[in-house]
């Protein structure tokens, strides 16, 4: 890459970074929702609708129009249907506003990360800004709703039939429990237990399960991934969580011990190639940045502090699974962002 090309790339990234602040402002102030379905809108109309200052509305609209997030013509701004699915509709599978909330949390935590990088210590999940927890819930929920019961679970051998009949399921590192709720809604004859070592997340998960009306078949408990109880489980799930754990071999060994003899593990991880050079693309850029600021620091805060990181790839993941005692390993399905592995004893 030439110097001119590098400068152009950095300027583009800086523009996107600054525009992320505008995305967050629009989210917090309800501006995206005020624009959704409204058609061509002036700054004054948006200000009146959202209850903000008109001068601020004008500058915010100009900024998101320059980013290409809204359309501009003849003094008015329009949030198209496609744009609304990204910024305003939190049920859309391409809703990305939650991702900006995750990114915002890393900037809030920057001074702490600087200190931990220099000291070589870990930075636990519970130590992060609260935007990380809510942003993670909002970012991953649409993807789980779109893929979990329609594509991922059906890709596992015989699992849907067991869930339909009656199965016992554990969701490890469940966070706010959005994945647990999606499964419980789809398979009312099965029971689900969510485990996470973050008490505030478990409390939020219980609230969301109650709101969804599935508390009769979903339970949550504060527990580490290598120390949760119950079982034997017919299915144990880990959604984008194994790579954050400081002892992935120990975690999978404990999971194997809690698994029914004919049970299965569904391991959902970021889709990454085994060769680093093949991950040097925009998706890899996001995952490596998240790994450097969230996943690896979190894993280093646990014993023995040897996390896989968000771009481990299939070969390293399978090596860990084999060391934990799993003998049947399969890549069940994937998409540009996620890969689903099926592990069996």
Image (cartoon, rainbow, N blue to C red):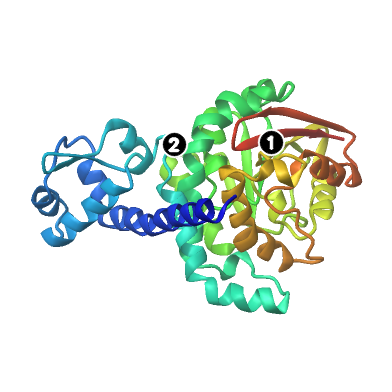
Q: Is residue 193 left or right of residue 39?
A: right
* Location of residue 13 in the rendering, given as x and y in whole percent from the top left corner: 46, 54
Q: Is residue 266 left or right of residue 212?
A: right
Q: Residue at x 27, y 42 (%)?
A: 70
| Helix, strand or loop status at disc 2 | loop
Q: Residue at x 71, y 79 (%)?
A: 119
Q: CA distance from mark 1 to mark 2?
A: 31 Å
Give the quadrant of residue 163. Answer: top right
Quarter of the picture containing the C terminus is top right
Q: Considering only order in the chain, which callout, 2 or 1, is on the residue closer to the N terminus?
A: 2
Q: Is residue 34 left or right of residue 283?
A: left
In the foreground, 54 or 267: 54
Q: Residue at x 53, y 54 (%)?
A: 6
Q: Residue at x 20, y 57 (%)?
A: 59
Work out whether residue 294 can be spotted. Answer: yes
* Location of residue 43 in the rendering, given as x and y in whole percent from the top left corner: 13, 51
* Residue occupied by mark 1: 168
How many labels, in total? Answer: 2
* Residue occupied by mark 2: 94
Give the quadrant of residue 51. Answer: bottom left
């Amino acid at each position: 890459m030439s110097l001119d090309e590098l400068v152009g790339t950095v300027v583009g990234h800086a523009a996107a970074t600054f525009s992320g602040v505008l995305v967050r402002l629009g989210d917090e102030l309800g501006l995206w929702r005020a624009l959704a379905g409204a058609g061509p809108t002036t700054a004054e109309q948006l200000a009146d609708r959202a209850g903000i200052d008109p001068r601020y509305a004008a500058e915010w609209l100009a900024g998101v129009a320059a980013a290409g997030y809204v359309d501009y013509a003849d003094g008015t701004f329009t949030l198209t249907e496609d744009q609304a699915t990204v910024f305003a509709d939190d049920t859309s599978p391409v809703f990305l506003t939650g991702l900006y909330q995750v990114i915002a949390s890393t900037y809030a935590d920057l001074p702490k990360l600087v200190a931990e990088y220099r000291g070589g210590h870990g930075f636990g999940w519970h130590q992060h800004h609260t935007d990380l927890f809510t942003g993670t819930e909002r970012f991953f929920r649409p993807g789980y709703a779109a893929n979990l019961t329609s594509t991922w679970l059906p890709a596992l051998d015989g699992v849907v039939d067991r869930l339909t009949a009656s199965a016992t399921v554990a969701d490890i590192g469940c966070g706010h429990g959005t994945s647990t709720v999606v499964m419980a809604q789809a398979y009312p004859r099965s029971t689900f237990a969510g485990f996470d070592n973050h008490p505030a997340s478990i409390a939020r998960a219980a609230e969301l399960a109650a709101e969804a009306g599935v508390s009769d078949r979903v339970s949550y408990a504060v527990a580490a991934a290598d120390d949760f109880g119950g079982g034997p489980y017919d299915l144990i799930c880990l959604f984008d969580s194994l790579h954050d754990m400081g002892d992935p071999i120990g975690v999978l060994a404990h999971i194997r011990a809690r698994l029914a003899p004919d049970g299965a593990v569904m391991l959902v991880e970021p889709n990454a190639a085994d060769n680093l050079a093949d991950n040097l693309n925009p998706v890899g850029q996001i995952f490596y940045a998240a790994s450097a600021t969230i996943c690896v620091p979190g894993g280093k805060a646990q014993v023995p502090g040897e996390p896989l990181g968000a771009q481990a790839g299939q070969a390293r993941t399978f090596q860990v699974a084999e060391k934990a005692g799993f003998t049947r390993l399969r890549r069940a399905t994937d998409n540009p962002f996620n890969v689903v592995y099926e592990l069996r004893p």
